[in-house]
Image (tube, coloured by chain):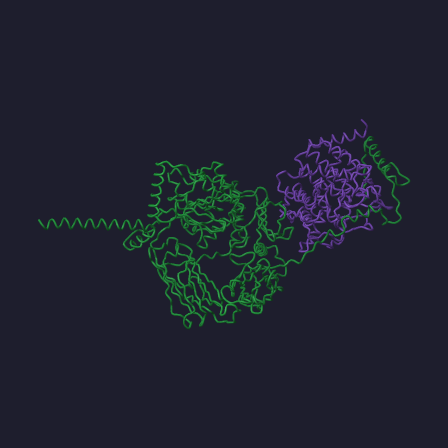
Amino acid sequence: MMRIRTRRRMTPGAARAVILAAALAVAAQGAAAQETATREAAVIPLAAADALPAAAVLHALRRDAADGARQGPAPVRTAPLRAAGAHGRLRLSGERAAADFTVTLPQDLPQDQPPRALRLAYRVGIEALPEQSSLTVIVNGVAATPLRPSAFSDFAAVTLPVEALRPGANHVRVEAVLHHRIYCGPDASYALWAEIDLAASGAVLQRRPSATPDGFAVALAQQTAASRPVEVRVAEDVDPRILRAVTVRLAALSADGGPAARQASLWDPAPSAPSLARVAIVPADRDAVDVVRGGDGALVLRVAVGPNPDGSAAGDGRAGLVAAILAALPAPPALSPAPALAPGAPVALSALGFADAAERGRHALRSLRFALPQDWTPVGSQSATLNLLYGYAASLPQGAQLLVRMNDKVIQTLPLDRGAGGRRPPLSIAFKTRALRPGVNTLAFETFVPGDPADLPCGRREDPLLQIQAASTLDIPASPRFLAPGMAAAIARLDGADVAMAPGADEAALAGGGLAPLLALPPRADGAPIRLRVATADQFDGASLGASLGASSGAALDDLAPDRAQVVAALAPPPAAAAAPTDAAKSGDAAQAPPQQASVFASARRTAAGLASLLEQAAFPGDPPLADWMTGRSARAMLLQPRRDAPDALWLVVAPNADMSLVARAIVEGRRAGAGPAGHVSLLGDDGVWRSWTAPDAAPALAEPLGWANGRAVLGVYASWAPAVFTAGGVGIAWLSAVIAMLFVILTRREGRT
Amino acid sequence: MNRRDFLIGAGVAACARRAAAAGPAPGVGASHPLQRAWRAWKAAHLAPEGRVVDGYQGGVSHSEGQGYGMTLAALFGDAPAFEAMRVWTETNLAVRDDPLLAWRWSPDAAIPTPDRNNASDGDLFYAWALLLAAERFGVAEHAARAATHAAALAALCLAERPDASGRVLLLPGVEGFRTSQGVIVNPSYAMPRALRELADAAGIAALADCADDAASLLDEMTATGLAPDWAEVTAAGWRPTAGRSSDNGYEAMRVPLFLIWSGDAGRPAVARQAEAQTRAAASEEGAAVVFARESGMVMERSLHPGYAALAGLTVCARSRAVGAAIPPFDPAQPYFPATLHLMALVAQIERAPRCFPL
């Protein structure tokens, strides 16, 4: 329909201004013969409809050329290999090694296109002889054709046809058999390795994961397999309860060592590596959780957060949304704690998850983790027994041996180069219970078989060099229930709900993912709650530490907790360069000032203090005084158990430049491996090792009634803890008994005479 | 005082009144997280001398890039960046005998601006940027420049529709876009909000008319398909024009963005585009960037996230969903998709708050 409208009219002045401007512009062009000064400008005659001036053509071409499709290589769609404690690249070491994985496929796979291929990105060390080496992939018990390795520098990806993949969880095992090109023996075995790129390996999918919770789980697995943190993108005001629920679950999903979640804004630029999966928390009219595809192709768990139903930050109104979030995210992997071993009776290694071992490599290491009760303690000179059922091949070269270790301490060295080999009689290996500790312990069998000869490649043999039967038993004596001094027991019982920031500390670490590995610890079954307060060194001060622990109770802190200066010094970044020897004197630093001339009384005081220290150390052998132990040490984090009467009250102080999530993981991993924080002060070094200090006068605490049945064992424990005191006490009792006996003899003799 | 000065003064006064009467300032707050994307865009596409560099086009600069960059700088409250771009623009592109800008500048050419024709979208955004900057930074001179430029645009780049309806069209340039039967137009050049705000500030009603008339032309076009990149408007209506794209491609993709940004998300052009993008669906080959106008068939895709941002904003603006498939900003993409990406994010904040980038 023709639209008839009244043309808006300019004011006369404006019209003249426009006309003047147009006239000036046109006049300046100096082009056409006829020009008018009206808005109905002359139509420029054209010879043909497409014979436009160059300007117009150039205009039209402004966007056409080469701005468009940027095509890269076709994306590889895989459901990645997942293994506990592994992400990025996994290394298999030695002549024979294997790794077990899980591959989880979506349930909504197309029926006519089930996955029938598995992609393996691998490489092997150049020392491996390809003709005698192989990589075998076994899917749900069905082995694919062994692969002869050919990638020695860069990773190569091969696609293996497999038929046994199915929706849901699949078990995949990769077995590596590697032969050294030149040498034979343990050293040659050390040099052999194969690596698997977990990010580039997995079941090949016909299409990318769909926008469903199943698909999101696959994308999430792809993200963590590639060692990329999962972004949690939030609007400016996000409910901390929602954020914490998401970050804790993501931490639990990567509790196998993968990278933590990373909080970002919804408007932040893209990360350097493309995202495959992320979470977006957005405000909305009502709560909702679903999976959508982001503009970059990533799968996004969209958490729409409606108005706070109960109007308060502390209320429970978010419980429904939190439950929906947890239901949409994949379930965390089932934790595999160390199997529990009950002391007091022989336990077969098979009951602890150990399978019959058949070693075929010239060097082999097989370990078994088990957990003793936290209130078990070694008693005096008690012994435990490993009843080993084993055998070895005949005619093994001289020097072949089996080392049996308990927590890195060799408890037995067995020669394998004696006799005719074969199955050996059961061997009873006794070792002191001092080699054990409450909580997680590790029993290891390490085999060394020299080459014969060592300077030629090993000959082919399929029979095992050593066999260890799972029917072997471990008999650890029971002990009275004691609680060892220090924080190990509290750390072992820690769960996510126990963690909080120290008063005045930044809560962001709690909600934003830095502490997520700790927050993801599963709930404790029973027992009193632990309180773990977290602060950075610049936030830590003794006053707040004392206040938070109830300093008004009068409990002394000094002997169990370093002062602020020591804490700051231990957690300070290393200096860039050592100061010149004269600088300390110039700075007037008293700690480094040259020693002053001592007065006689000061010298006497120092001598007396030194003697007292010597006596104390003799009475309670153990760690030196805390101040001495702390001197010169540096750490990225410090755990404290500062009160004797409050063993469940802990502090974590983190260096200002330390990665909070790495510290949190170190606590979790140390707890899992049995080599975590202990004592009253524990420092996490840059090497990831916890080094602990225990107050030398802190006695183990008996956790059961003392009676005739356990009295002797209890005495043994205290004797081990303070042998000099016990000996002195024993000598004292003996002397007193002797005195009493002499008096009795003297007195009765006198009566006899009279 | 002559009439010109009076008009300009009236325009300045209007701008000042507008600034005083305006509600919350447009744009992005100084502490908004999107400022990080702005800094990344500058690092990638803005040379220190204030020249926006179009790397894909041989490292040239053009009035569109300067206008876009200045507009974004004003919206992000970045006065130094704005001033650098303004000075460079006026030094290097203001070479015509009227206030309009030469459309293209080549760094390696003996004569950097051999073609002194203007590009009306560049001039429009340049003028709008000056107006925004006058309000954001409180610099009255920018308002005066905006008024002058708007007046020149109105005087030189508006043409009546050949159907004698009295409706006006925005010429893509002063020269070369009139044919024997009509006028060649680029529907994406007439950014409604810019036209209206300049019309209001400078008192040039014709610009507001142009905004309305451009919208009604779009309604005509989208009655039979998607908005075209280029078209010829004749007395009989409109038709594809020879020699340039009549598909819905790299030009027309800005139409829904500018409509949404202008508060016109309800226009049929946006609905059509949203439908086409929804049908095109997400693909591993990227967002659809060129559609056959009438059939909506996807003719080309691109992996540059900026184009996906346009698609995501458009689809979300026509839905009731919370959150849009707008990817995170990637400064590594070329100037054009990067700039559109940033514009889409600003438009989301200003006009489509529900369409959070997911």
Chain B image colour: purple
In the picture, measured across the screen, residue A329 lies left or right of residue B275, that is left
Q: How many marks?
A: 0
Please name whichever residue, B121 or A645, is drawn nearer the observer in this view of the structure. Answer: A645
Residue A539, x across and y down, in percent? 49, 40
> Most extreme residue toward the top, as rendered?
B1
Report whether residue A106 is seen: no
Q: Position of residue A332 (x, y in %)?
A: 51, 54
- For the N terminus of chain A, give its image quadrant: top right
* Left or right of B172 on screen, residue A222: left
Across and down, in percent, residue A195 comes to 56, 61
Q: Quadrant of residue A356?
A: bottom left
Image chain in green = A
Q: Residue furthest left?
A: A754
Picture quarter containing residue A124?
bottom right
Residue A450: x %, y % from top left: 47, 67
Q: Is residue A137 visible?
A: yes
Q: Nearer the viewer, residue A445 or A319?
A: A445
Q: Is residue B33 above or below residue A114?
A: above
Asked if residue B67 lies left or right of residue A568, the reply is: right
In the image, A319: left or right of A472?
Answer: right
